[in-house]
Image (tube, rainbow, N blue to C red):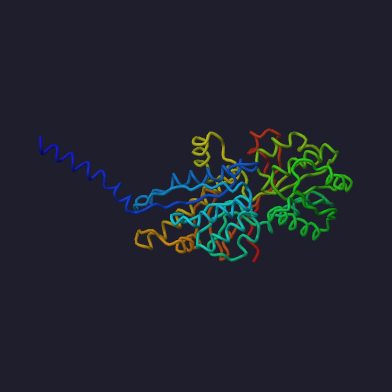
Amino acid sequence: MMKKTLTVVLLLAVALIPVAVLAQGGTIKIATQSPLSGGQSAIGVDIKNGAELALEQLKAPLEKMGFKVELAPYDDQANPDNGVANSKNIVADPTILAVVGHYNSGVQIPSSENYHSANLANVSPANTNPKVTDRGYAEVSRIVGRDDVQGVVAAQFVHSKGMKSAYVLHDKTAYGQGIATFFQQEAKKLGMKVQGFEGTEEKANFDAILAPVIAAKSDVIFFGGIYDQASVFFKQAREKGYKGMFISDDGYDSPEAVSIGGPALLEGGGLYYTTVAGPAKLYPGTAKFQTDFKAKYGADPRPFAAQGYDSMAICLKGIEEAAKAAGNKLPARKDVAAAVRKLKDFNGITGKINFNEKGDLTVAKYFVIQVISPDPAKWNDNKIDKTLDIAPPK
């Protein structure tokens, strides 16, 4: 009996060894920053959810080294002040070795100044303003394209559709104003008449700005900004009698856009948007992700959820490579950032990922999409008008 008891005790001790090793390795956290509340939370929550799913599915190599791996989600509320405040808390936590975020370039740019100062790797799933990477920070990389390409794609598209005049609006953010500027510049190069270029922070009553827009009778209205503002404007423009084409950007890419704007958006010249992401179904490698995401969160992934997944996957791989180089010990932040940037031909669910010296993709995808239904449930069925693979400007 004593021998049998001793055997059981030994077996239990062996079974507990992984727990002991896990405790010795320490805790690694990866933060996310995106709007988890407020008007843009539909997209922000799914960025976080995509990252969370990746962490759960891909953390095993680090756990085998003895680390406990955790998610640290932060709500930036699409507000620069909140993002910067959060970034200070993030860099103050030594267990955080990387950040997935943000959604808004106007939040990412000031927040990433703190990541840069702390040598903390920041992989962006959604930020498109050129300044995100043009600062040349070794810590900051993104897995989507740039506005100085996306704005050009939009202008070339409407020109190809026979549009000869445009009215350009933006939301006064770094993102919205930036892409609107690139659209305006390319439209003029193509010989289009730009009849107005204005920024507005209004989100409810656009009467004052609509008067000159309607009077101009432009063939197309471009709005640089986010869906929660642009759709209200588009709806009111239709109600005031505008019959031309609407086009926006990847900030418009959310099923909530048609929930806000309704069927009127699709009247007249129709509604289009460019995006650096698009529905997950556009990427051949996302089939399992789509199934797993819906099983876990009860809904199909919204735009940028797949990019949230890949951003987290890259962070995990960078930490793994840096930990191996450190002898399976907790790596330094600067080594994680260097390992992220050095990854070659990383097989993400959205495709093969390679970064250039700035942190841009060596080749990025751009889509032009036509909204075809006012039903939010059919957002992922929108018509893909163009798919382009374009290298970043040099």
**Figure quadrant of the N terminus:** top left
State the residue lying farthest toward the right: 215
**Figure quadrant of the C terminus:** bottom right
Image x and y of residue 337, in percent = 49, 61
In the picture, residue 110 is in which quadrant?
A: bottom right
Image x and y of residue 20, in percent = 29, 49
> Where is 173 relative to 288, above or below?
below
Image x and y of residue 39, in percent = 65, 41
Name the residue: 44% across, 44% down.
Answer: 56
Name the residue: 80% across, 61% down.
Answer: 189
> Where is 114 relative to 273, above or below?
below
Image x and y of residue 34, in percent = 58, 48
> As drawn, is 213 to the left or to the right of 115?
right
> Where is 33 relative to 42, above or below?
below
> As drawn, is 340 to the left or to the right of 126?
left
> As drawn, is 109 to the left or to the right of 89?
right
In the picture, residue 108 is in which quadrant?
A: bottom right
Of residues 187 and 40, the one drawn nearer to the viewer in this rendering: 40
How many marks are shown on the rendered structure?
0
